[in-house]
Amino acid sequence: MTSPEVSTQNEDAGPGGYAAARLLLLHEKERSGPPRRTALARLTDDWLAGLFAAAAPPRGTALVAVGGYGRSELSPRSDLDLLLLHDGTADKAAIAALADRIWYPVWDLGLALDHSVRTPAEARTTAAEDLKVHLGLLDARPLAGDAGLVAALRTTVLADWRNQAPKRLPALDELCRERAERMGELQFLLEPDLKEARGGLRDAQALRAVAASWLADAPREGLDRARRRLLDTRDALHLTTGRATDRLALQEQDAVAAELGLLDADTLLREVYEAARTISYATDVTWREVNRVLKARSARPRLRSLLGGRSGTGRSGGKPPIERTPLAEGVVEMDGEVVLARTARPERDPVLPLRAAAAAAQSGLPLSPHAVRRLAATAKPLPVPWPAEAREELVTLLGAGEATVPVWEALEAEGIVTRLLPDWERVRCRPQRNPVHTWTVDRHLVETAVRAASLTRRVGRPDLLLVAALLHDIGKGWPGDHSVAGETIARDLAARVGFDRTDTATVATAVRHHLLLVETATRRDLDDPATVQAVATAVGTLGTLELLHALTEADALATGPAAWSSWRASLVADLVKRVAGVLAGEPLPDPEAAAPSAEQERLAIEALRTGEPVLALHARDEHTAGPDEPAPEPVGVELVIALPDRPGVLPAVAGVLALHRLTVRAADLRAVDLPTGLGSGSVLVLDWRVAAEYGSLPEAARLRADLVRALDGSLDIPARLAEREAAYPRRRGLAAPPPRVTVAAADSRLATVIEVRAQDAPGLLHRIGRALEGAAVRVRSAHVSTLGANAVDTLYVTRPDGSLLPPEEAADLARTLETALG
């Protein structure tokens, strides 16, 4: 029922009355979603019909809503897609005047308008030339004027669409693919475009167009509900921002969630992702069916030609039989899809869903949606623990690599995954707020298993690697540390899947410590025996270490491009080698007894002789290439600096490197005692690992010259860094959280470990060094880890005499650093 305020506008076609009624309607809290969109479309219909009638239109004219407005799906800031249709008999000036009397009032209200004036023949010609115009005309709806003219156009346009489907649908498919490549997948984006991203409203419209062709139809229930959720979200986005935007930006998500009555932004994103996943899955299945039908149609004329014009191959002249190729017990391939055999009995065979999925993934074929739906409806539940065959089929499915993903999505679409692994529901469509992550939690788990499948030759137990990869972040659906929660969940699920007690414990340990290797390698001093011993104690066995090494790489590769590099890989490999030595009973070397390298000693002598900084700069490779191997990828550049010990060395060097756009990955600082006879005095040797942000490395002579200037005070590093930062305006978005500095719980006998977590920025290590100089502590080493916009800098510090800081002094230092960085 229309409210009284809205219904009175039927008698007032003026722009003021329409604007007031529109504003009142948009702020009615009792009416939202489809009822509000429909009411807004009706209100707009009445107003435009009034404008049309008041303009005294000639005979043979009509006003037509097309596109989203034609579907009566008006969001608060939607464009009005209008076509002024005429039969060509009226004077052109009269038609132009009629158009002006409709378009100008719309513009006067500030409404976006997409308009055209055409005859039916012109509309048909334009549709034949422009696919988007044809799609809009499929939803044409008369607003006022000659309804017969509109009905005739609709009939003609729809007939053209069906007749031209073999040409039009591949073009539409290509258009959708290009848009997906450009806009990304809605179900994984932190700031998705609700309309243009893959799985968004454009794809839902494309599915309607495919259905109108009569060639195929979207297969999955819930499609209308998914589309409605995206439309509701767009409505709320328009209302909260006051803008015609389809991009769900981070800073708008809390307000949009509140407008929709949802708990928070994460709940909003999960609902949006779920809707997008429904549309994406329906899109995949629909286009696969379209391509199959078109391929079959194109093959029939060739088949008839080969058969001399006969219509069939059997005695009765019927269709040739469809081949069914067995793949596994109860599973066959038919017409390019995996389907259930005629003899399959899902109600008696609880392993059949996993067997069918594994067969599909291993064959690189899609699972028929009809087969999946039948399995979801009739398959007998697996006993707990699972039988060995079920566990083996799960491992086979996970080990298929890239082919696992579409099969897993088909199982998820019908709820089979959560039936097999109940804890999966908590991570399903769960967003990851860290922009380093490419995927939602559940898809990241599957992608990690995909990556792990290529590493199974490196481990003794591939099955444990694949299952640990699938479960390593399963704790993210629970509060607290996801590794701790995940250990408990993984233990339960591994036992459910049918692993024995020993294997279950190994999977649980891998999940508990899946971040241990990469965090230790990038944030701790590997020359410190306590670091290596702590990892060895946590891992326990060489087999588990081997498993964790592969899992670490698979996890990082599945996270995103910023999470893994040759540099990180080399650090993790170095740590694994050291830990393997400890587990094998080899003694750890004493870092205090290690002599300086020949290069360090040479540079130290030169620095002592000249009293000036001396440096050397050269690339480091991950490994030495064999005769038939390509050149190794550099994992960074080693910069060795020697200079007489003096205050301000760390901030000066860090500042000069920042000015030259060199990213610091690690720094080791040590005092070198030269042999007797070479002179006296303390020489500081700094061994840095750096990488160029972009472009080539600077010349060593330029670095040295700037370092000399920084040390004598003639180069104002803070001012130069501030100038550079001011030259690049900040990107609009959420404010970065404040830095956090803590005393790390590391059992190091060499130094106190301070951990700084902050927004990554040029000169961050320089600012840290300045604060440490003011606190009168000595820096033994620094280890820099950066993921996206977040930096974790770990500092090994001592008193000036080399002793560890007492707990109260360490806590004071952490507070001082936090204040200085804030």
Image (cartoon, rainbow, N blue to C red):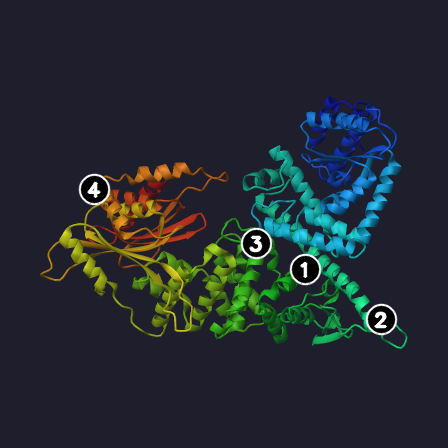
Whole-angstrom CA distance, mark 1 to mark 3, is 17 Å
Distance Cα–Cα, label 3 vs label 4: 51 Å
Q: Quadrant of the C terminus?
A: top left
Instruction: State how far apart marks 1 and 4 are (Cα).
Output: 68 Å
| Dot placed on the residue nearer the N-terminal end, 2 or 3 | 2
Distance from label 2 to label 3 (Cα)? 46 Å
The part of the image, by quadrant, that contains residue 400 is bottom right
- Is residue 184 visible to the viewer in this orientation of the structure? no
419 vs 719: above or below: below
Which of discs 1 and 3 lies nearer the camera? The answer is 3
> Which amino acid type corresponds to the residue marked 2 in the rendered image?
Lys
Q: Which badge, 1 or 4, is on the more N-terminal residue?
A: 1
Name the residue carrying label 2.
319
Query: Badges 2 and 3: C-beta atoms under 8 Å apart?
Result: no
**Which residue does the numbered mark 4 point to in the structure image?**
712
Residue underneath mark 3: 440
Q: Is residue 78 visible?
A: yes
Question: What residue did someone put label 1 on?
Answer: 415
